[in-house]
Amino acid sequence: MLKEINGEQFRELLDHGLKNLRLYREKVNDLNVFPVPDGDTGSNMILTLENGMSAIRSGSDELDTLARAFVTAVIFGARGNSGVILSQFLKGMCECFYDAGSIRSEQLSAAFEAGVACAYRAVAEPVEGTMLTVLRESSAAVASACKRSVISAIDEAIAVFLQAAYVSLENTPELLPVLKSAGVIDSGGAGLVYMFEGMQKYLNNEPIENKDEEQSDAHYIDYSKFNPESEFALGYCTELLIQLLKGKQSFDYASFKDGISAFGSSIVTSYEDEKVKVHIHTSEPEKLLAFCHRFGEFLAVKIENMSVQHSEASRLYLSPQRSASAFGVVAVSHDGVMRERYLAMGADVVIDASSGYNPSAKDFTEAFADTGCSVIFVFPNSKNAIFAAEQASGLYKDARVIVLPSKSAAECYSALSMLDFDSCDIEGVTNQLMENIVSIFTVTVTRAVKDAVYDSRSIRRNDYIALAGSRLLGIDSDPFAVAEAVCAAVFEKNEYSVVTVFLGASLDAEAGEKVADIIAARSEYTDVDTINTRAEAYDMLLSFE
């Protein structure tokens, strides 16, 4: 039995949880409720954890330092609903380890409960039968076992958590009808189970198959972006491993840390076995190297230009004309066509979310900073990006950030077309945007990636499915038959003056004309506009106004 764990062991717990979750990425992704290609829960949880782990893989082994660094990174790296909820649970948990040197079972139990409270607070309308329920019931089981003195070791606490998680996960369809109808368990809850299974494997000394999916270092960098007039304001991310040597300048760790503080920020150091690890962001790496060289020789040196890193990693597109409005606009785009449309319509910054990419909280905060505005309207344009945008709005302190509940390109497109950029009445603009988004009726047509039964209706792989939120409006192997079914259902109850048809990458302009004819046959006085996008997330998006 392991009575307590230190910082290094805590890092291994998290790392093994991530490694095991990677093994089951596709299995978790496939647990999406609808048989459409939007299953990304596993990927979002993995990317969130990876961002957290990137901050603690090197540097100090002290629990307090690790916990603080991990919290910051995992919060900023959170992606998708599942990633944000996971990051909030880990935040609440890790904050219990600040100023602590080790963790015992009773501390871990209290941390679990703090994490659950933090996760629930992050969700405006918590839904039971999701990963929130799995977290709550599993943490409660550990707390109960601790109070009854049934457990007194870390491995016992993790075992109790897992056993309760298995039961809770299997019960999620009974709490959430949409899961039961689709015949699946909650995907986020499944991801949690695999993560904690990885932690248990570490405590039991069980190996985990190595499935590192990190990109090769031999990736292409477009250095043509830089020229003699380029600004390199971000400095260098510098990491050193120094072997202290006799005959060199005498070494005092406290004085050393004070000395390197003059060279930069984001400093993390550790000292063990006459070796010193240094991580620092500095604009003058040559001076840092000269200072450190006084004490020994370098076993490893890594210096990376953060301006280059930012250029390569950034998925932000800025408007060439800076906003002169009383507010800025940030929008998320899932294809290049809509990205350029948003910029042309007045967006200051567009976050590229093509190819299934879900923006992180860090993506949003960087976009907020790039607007240079004191008030910012945000269009997440996906239910999977709203949580991350809201989390980022709480992290960003230099502006008032208003996250709008846009869940598709259609809502953003309509809202931007009606937006009064000359208005200084922020409350009036907010109300108008909210009213505009709520008034739009949107239907998504996409293809099933697997056989399924939903609402007692059979869906076959490659069928076209029309969804209005969670409501199924049509199923057919022919996209135009589905469009017919949608129009029949929509125009039977309401009249709309404008319909915009967004065509995905799989359909061409001729298909758009056919859909326009179908709409005109149902309502001859309705204006129809078609936009050919390169979106992969849908085949058609129909917006009724």
Image (cartoon, grey):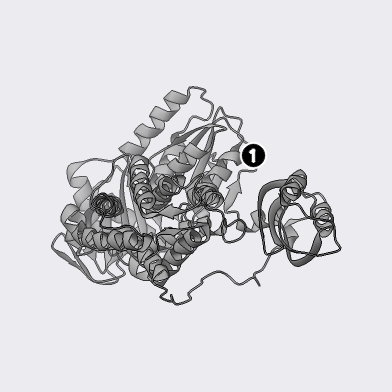
Q: Which secondary structure, mark 1? A: loop
Circle 1 is placed at which residue position?
321
Q: Which residue is drawn at 38% across and 71% down?
A: 204
- The x and y percentages for residue 184 are 23, 64
Q: Residue at x 18, y 43 (%)?
A: 493
Which residue is situated farthest in the top direction here? 425
- The x and y percentages for residue 401 are 49, 34
- The x and y percentages for residue 510 are 40, 62
- Residue 63 seen: yes
User: For this rendering, which residue is in front, 432 or 300?
Assistant: 300
Residue kind at label 1, given as amino acid type:
Gln
Vertical placement of residue 351 versus 32, above or below: above
Horizontal side, residue 515 vs residue 457: left or right: right
- The x and y percentages for residue 378 are 47, 39
User: For this rendering, which residue is in front, 267 or 537?
Assistant: 267
Horizontal side, residue 295 vs residue 239: left or right: right
For the C terminus, the quadrant is top left
Q: Residues within 10 Å of mark 1 (few under 14, many from 20)?
A: few
- Residue 460, image quadrant: bottom left
Horizontal side, residue 273 vs residue 18: left or right: right
User: For this rendering, which residue is in front, 390 or 383?
Assistant: 390
For the N terminus, the quadrant is bottom left
